[in-house]
């Protein structure tokens, strides 16, 4: 025979899950801040976190504006957006660092411009192919997946924008200091 099933979560458990989700969001942002700080310099860390905060705030604003239900899948979408945007930003930052080493006499503004132009096609193609999949999920996945896929679609567009236009511009405004060696080039403890 057929079994009827009813899944529900009480308000106390629901509030706890939501609080844990928000905590995960904050912890993810903090861990990414530390990662970028050690991998690059503080200017890059500030640029990356500002871009991520931009992505989250704009996406939350879109939820509020369109009165879309904000639930645990929305938090999962925000965490995914943060990871995706951070990946895009790290690709650009890596290229800035590589180009700075390669073109030592070039002005910082030109190094950043070169890095952005070099990574632009990769960034747009990656975002474009991801968006194709997300549109398929949005239109064919049913109402259960529409909220999450909408958040991801919007967040990836905003994240791509912030990776290209906000993070690097903020690094430029704060100034870059390439006199210090990056973490991976510093001689470590040899055990001798």
Image: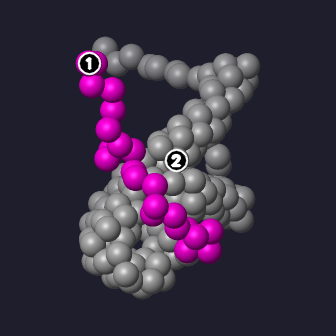
For disc 1, the marked residue is 192
- Looking at the rendering, the stretch of residues picked out in magenta corresponds to 171-192
Q: Which mark is residue 37?
A: 2
Left or right: 162, with 1 as reference point: right
Q: Quadrant of the C terminus?
A: top left
Residue 12 screen position, x and y as percent: 73, 19
Q: Residue 38, how many percent across, how many down?
A: 47, 44
- Name the residue at the front extreme: 192
Instruction: Find residue 70 and report its horizontal and vertical position in percent.
Output: 64, 46
Q: Residue at x 39, y 44 (%)?
A: 183
| Residue 7 appears left or right of 117 | right
Determine whether 36 is above or below 13 in the image. Answer: below
Principal SS element in the magenta part? Answer: loop
> Is residue 94 rendered magenta in the image?
no
Is residue 175 in the magenta section? yes
Relative horizontal placement of residue 78, taking residue 10 as reference (left or right): left
Q: Residue at x 37, y 64 (%)?
A: 97
Which mark is on residue 89?
none
Q: Residues within 10 Å of mark 2 (few under 14, many from 20)?
A: some
Image height of 35 relative to 19, above or below:
below
- Asked which secondary structure carries label 1, the reply is loop
């Amino acid at each position: 025979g057929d079994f009827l099933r009813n899944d529900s979560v009480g308000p106390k458990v629901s509030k706890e899950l939501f609080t844990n989700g928000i905590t995960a969001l904050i912890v993810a942002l903090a861990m990414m801040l530390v990662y970028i700080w050690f991998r690059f310099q503080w200017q890059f860390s500030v640029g990356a976190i500002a871009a991520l905060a931009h992505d989250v705030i704009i996406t939350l604003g879109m939820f509020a504006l369109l009165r879309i239900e904000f639930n645990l899948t929305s938090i999962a979408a925000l965490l995914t957006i943060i990871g995706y945007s951070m990946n895009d930003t790290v690709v650009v930052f890596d290229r800035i660092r590589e180009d700075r080493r390669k073109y030592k006499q070039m002005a910082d503004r030109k190094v950043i411009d070169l890095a952005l132009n070099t990574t632009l096609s990769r960034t747009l193609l990656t975002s474009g192919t991801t968006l194709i999949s997300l549109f398929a999920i949005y239109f064919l996945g049913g109402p259960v997946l529409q909220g999450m896929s909408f958040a991801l679609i919007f967040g990836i567009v905003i994240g791509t924008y912030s990776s290209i236009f906000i993070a690097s511009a903020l690094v430029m405004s704060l100034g870059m200091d390439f006199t210090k060696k990056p973490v991976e080039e510093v001689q470590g403890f040899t055990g001798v």
